[in-house]
Image (cartoon, helix red, strand yellow):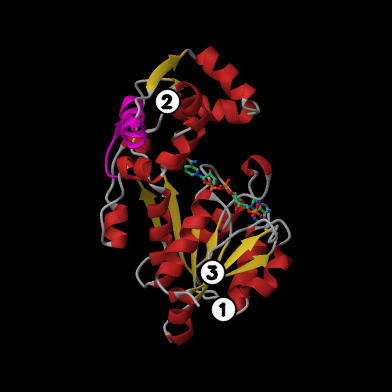
Amino acid sequence: MTQTQQHTQTDPHALTLLVTGATGTVGRQVVAELLDRGHRVRALTRDPEKAAFPDGVEVVRGDLTEPDTLVPALEGVTGLHLITFGGAYFAPLETGPRILELARAAGVRRVTVLHGGGPSLLEDAVRADDELDWTVLMPVEFMANALAWAPGIVENDEVREPFADRISAMVHEGDIGAVAAVALTEEGHGRREYVLTGPEVLTLADKTAAIGAARGREVALVELSEDEAVAQWRAAGHDDEVVGFLLEAYGNTPEVGYTVVDTVEKVTGRPARTFAAWAARHAHAFTA
Ligand SMILES: NC(=O)c1ccc[n+]([C@@H]2O[C@H](COP(=O)([O-])OP(=O)(O)OC[C@H]3O[C@@H](n4cnc5c(N)ncnc54)[C@H](OP(=O)(O)O)[C@@H]3O)[C@@H](O)[C@H]2O)c1
């Protein structure tokens, strides 16, 4: 039996929480942070056979595009973490109002939503809800996006990107998970919208230097023209919509994307994690 299992079986304060998007970059972190705090965690996935989770996590099958499949997963749940999309290319869910209806009926009191960067029926329904304590999580660029550089770094010791002078206050996905865990289990976070950033503003050169230091071998930054970048993204399989989004996000980053805020520290009580720490933890991904 793991420490977490022992803890949750004996702790009368342990809550039961349902995490959607649980197999994703952020969802896995939400699961881990809730588990660390000694709570009972249900992880939703469309394919439980493929989802690998630590001991103590209850894996449940469900599809957000078919909300009634969530009914068994919601039984006994007091807190629910939601994503706003339901399939390929982050297509916004159209089932948000029904999901919330089922959540309220099951006795859910707190909801966190990972903002999807654009409007969604689900987020609108959450914000309009005056019964639930909801918290909208609005992270800037995830540090995990740097994993897309792994093949180029492993094969050629280089990162090929456009807009080399762009800056970002990128956030550690573990910190998004930590803020979600606090908001789902503690009072005082209802009807809040939290912009989440890391502790510093970084250039692309800062990021490649941090990865180079973590793997013990320098990484060169090769600046691409816009046309070269578009060709690279298309070769990676991105459609027009994604290519347009990347051009806008990287070529014309909104101020919120490069402005450090202290929400992570305020909510979790400890400083936001640095990209150097992220790179050290993921050094293996950048090493042949
Ligand atoms: N990357 C960034 O820099 C960034 C920054 C800010 C915000 N965001 C937002 O973050 C979100 C992406 O989060 P992420 O990277 O953690 O996601 P991700 O790693 O791509 O994971 C996708 C998750 O969605 C689940 N899912 C998809 N369709 C589903 C459905 N119909 N029913 C149930 N589950 C479904 C998948 O579960 P199964 O496959 O296991 O069913 C999986 O767990 C997007 O909304 C994006 O706009 C991203």
Relative image position of residue 147 (x, y in whole percent): 48, 37
The residue carrying mark 3 is 55
Element under label 1? loop
Q: Residues within 10 Å of mark 3 (few under 14, many from 20)?
A: few
Badge 1 amino acid: Gly
Relative image position of residue 210 (x, y in whole percent): 32, 33
Question: Any mark on residue 252, and which?
Answer: 2
Q: Residues within 10 Å of mark 1 (few under 14, many from 20)?
A: some
The residue carrying mark 1 is 107
Span colored in magenta = 198-216
Mark closer to the observer (2, 3): 3
Q: Is residue 141 visible?
A: no
Element under label 2? loop
When asked about the image quadrant of residue 51, the answer is: bottom right
- Please tell me which residue is depicted at 49% across the width and 52% down the height of the picture: 26
Relative image position of residue 278 (x, y in whole percent): 36, 44
Question: Any mark on residue 138, and which?
Answer: none
N-terminal-most mark, 2 or 1: 1
Depth check: give the residue in front, 49 or 267: 49
Element under label 3? loop
